[in-house]
Amino acid sequence: MGSGFSNQCKVRQCFQCQGDTEFYCNTCKHDLCLKCKERHVFDLDTMHLYVMIYREKYDYVTKQETCKKYPGMFYQEYCDSCKISICFQCTEHRHHQILNSRTTYKTNRQKHRAIIHNIRSETLYNNSCVLAGIKADMKTCHKEISIIQSKMLTKAQKLRNLIDTVICDVKLRHKTFILSLQQQRRKINRNIASIETFEHRSDQSAKRPLKFLMYLKKTTRVHKFKDTPNLTQYALVYVSEDIKNEDVTDLLGEIQIIQRGKRQVRMEGLLKQMSTPVLHRSNTVPGEILYHISCVTPDRAWISDGKNLILINTEGDICIYSSHINGDLLVGMQSFFKPIIARYNDTGQHIKTIQYDNTGQKLYSRPIYITENRNGDVIVSDYWFGVDAVAVTDSRGRHRFSYTGHPSESQLEPRGICTDALSNILVCDVNTNTIQIIDKNGHFLSLILTRQQGLIEPTGLSYDDKTHLLWVGSYWEKKVCVYRYIEKHDYL
């Protein structure tokens, strides 16, 4: 056309692939396509970042929506009284509280930001996990149902054979019973005839007394009469001795239909342990030494140097606060004669004291590190003059087990402890400079961190349930390192 220029349109592409940009991470400043956005919000390292629709970056609305009541008009305002969008012809709302639609949108989206984030990062991922389980069940259900049907047919045939056997046995026994009754009837008839004959002769001989006495003497010596002859008694219904009640019960009760209820998402289906932990960051903290550590947010943690509580974050800034804890408190009391664990509620009321094992012996020596597992178990790191163990009691205070170290390692010297989302127990061992992981029943699983990975005298340990990161504090180095050893399953 001779215009002298050509119009060009540049399409923004995802920073990870060549897909079209639909979303924007306002934290890491990256453009994202739909698939990369899903991975961005599912990944444990980036799930807490702020991802938004790309147009929100420029506060731009690409499309006006048509009013449902007046199709020729567009929504321009928002009626806060009725909680609906309106156009200029919706005059019935003019006396209500009218707000700007864009401002209201921003306010409400910010208000629901946490809900949207939870849906993106947790709900959709959990549903993907459930969907994966459903797909796996669909692949195997036809085969499993066929096996069950085959078993049911086999059991039904066996049961039918047993019933037929019982029926035949009953018929045979019935026939034998009838023959026996007939035989007994003949015996009774002969007995009656003999008695009647004896009676008749007795009556006839009674006319001649001397002859009667001689007859009685002769008859009594030769015959002994009984009122009823010995007769065998039979039951009316018999079950073959070859058929046992247990056999019938097994056939009727072995195959059962179990209602499992609503399909639940288990942590084992969402998370898995990595083969090698990955160091995310480390910070040197002030103070003389480092005892305890407790993370409160993905980038902040409380530490204790034995005298002070110090709040640190990943930038290295510090603030000193007084301790503020809500909910139940688990307190370890280190009296030499009476070491106990005491539980208090949020009002300070004493709930329970844990002091003895199941045999009445003293359970603790120096309970200094305490945590609680997802199943309600109270886990205590106990060490004092060779009495070194991780003691675990249930929610009622009953001793479940004590862990004293992996058999291939030397004596455990436990310090910091925590539990993770998989209900595993992690413990610092300053003797071997390792962090050991055991399951909720006390079975050794693996060494997560060792001295070869730079671990020196680990004492503080804390697990973040939101990011699934492990915070590790070193006693003399006064260093806090953050590791990832748990990741999500990939259902995308």
Image (tube, rainbow, N blue to C red):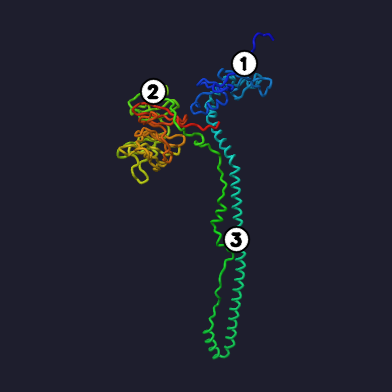
Residue type, label 3 = Val
Instruction: State which tag comes first along the sequence, 3 or 2.
Output: 3
Badge 3 density bin: few <14, some 14–19, many ≥20, Cα 10 Å: some
In what element is the residue under mark 1? loop
Q: Amino acid at mark 1?
A: Cys
Does label 1 or label 2 sit earlier along the sequence? 1
Label placed on residue 9 = 1
Q: Are marks 3 and 2 in contact (CB under 8 Å)?
A: no
Q: Residue 176 placed where, x, y %? A: 60, 68
**Picture residue at 59% right of the left edge, 52% below the top:** 155
Quadrant assignment for the C terminus: top right
- Mark pair 1, 2: CA separation: 51 Å
Q: Name the residue carrying label 3.
A: 166
| Of marks 3 and 2, the one in the foreground | 3
Q: Quadrant of residue 144?
A: top right
Q: Which residue is mark 2?
A: 319
- Binning the other alpha carbons within 10 Å of mark 1 as few (below 14), some (14 to 19) or many (20 upward) gives few
